[in-house]
């Protein structure tokens, strides 16, 4: 299962970081692959679903994300699925000075023919993680402005 984890600091407080990250429609602002992400059901709590359209390794993919776990203001866990993919985006937030430290973990598993792409995805993830963290940190830092 390809996965990547990165930790960074932000000027956003834990409450501000949690509020921003728990609304996955914000992925349009920080996830370099996301083209659109719209809430399709729920009130933002556990069980809320989002329709995400992303570009990944030259392909456009549609993924349904479901809020799997919320532990204010320290943890957000979203589960993404489609016919051949399951992914987990996990954010762990702790206070750090006047801001926060965020640990972002992305885990992916594939089924069917898409399993053949797993090695390419694993090789690409560190590159994608660097860009994602830079954009995520910038988006979170704006939450204090």
Image (cartoon, rainbow, N blue to C red):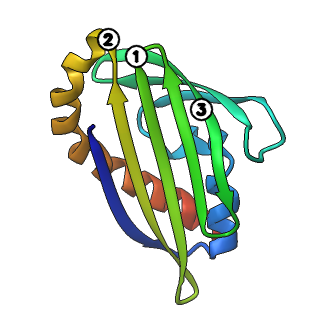
- The answer to whether residue 24 is seen in the rendering is yes
Which mark, residue 84?
Answer: 1
Q: Can you tell which quarter of the image residue 59 is in?
A: top left
The residue under the point 61% across, 69% down is 74
Q: Are marks 1 and 2 in contact (CB under 8 Å)?
A: yes
The residue under the point 63% across, 76% down is 13
Disc 2: CA contacts within 10 A as few (<14), some (14-19) or many (>=20): few
Relative to the observer, which residue lies in front, 13 or 107?
Answer: 107
Image coordinates of residue 78 in percent, x first then y, are 57, 43
The residue under the point 33% across, 61% down is 6
* Secondary element type, mark 2: helix
Relative to the observer, which residue lies in front, 125 or 119?
Answer: 119
The residue identified by callout 3 is 65
Whether residue 111 sits left or right of residue 116 in the image: it is right
Image coordinates of residue 139 in percent, x first then y, are 54, 56
Q: Give the number of callouts.
A: 3
Q: Earlier in the sequence, mark 3 or mark 1?
A: 3
Q: Can you tell which quarter of the image residue 122 is in?
A: top left
The quarter of the image holding the N terminus is top left
The residue identified by callout 2 is 112
Q: Can you tell which quarter of the image residue 14 is in?
A: bottom right
Image coordinates of residue 121 in percent, x first then y, are 23, 31
Disc 1: CA contacts within 10 A as few (<14), some (14-19) or many (>=20): few
């Amino acid at each position: 299962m390809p996965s990547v984890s990165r930790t960074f600091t932000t000027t956003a407080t834990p409450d501000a970081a949690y509020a921003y990250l728990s609304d996955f429609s914000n992925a349009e602002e920080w996830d370099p692959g996301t083209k659109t992400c719209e809430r399709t059901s729920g009130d933002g709590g556990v069980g809320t679903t989002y329709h995400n359209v992303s570009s990944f390794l030259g392909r456009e993919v549609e993924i349904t994300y479901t809020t799997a776990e919320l532990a204010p203001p320290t943890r957000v866990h979203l589960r993404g699925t489609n016919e051949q993919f399951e992914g987990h985006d996990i954010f762990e937030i702790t206070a750090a000075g006047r801001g926060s430290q965020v640990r972002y973990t992305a885990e992916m598993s594939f089924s069917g023919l898409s399993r053949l792409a797993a090695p390419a995805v694993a090789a690409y993830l560190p590159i994608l993680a660097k860009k994602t963290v830079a954009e995520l940190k910038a988006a979170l830092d704006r939450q204090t402005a």
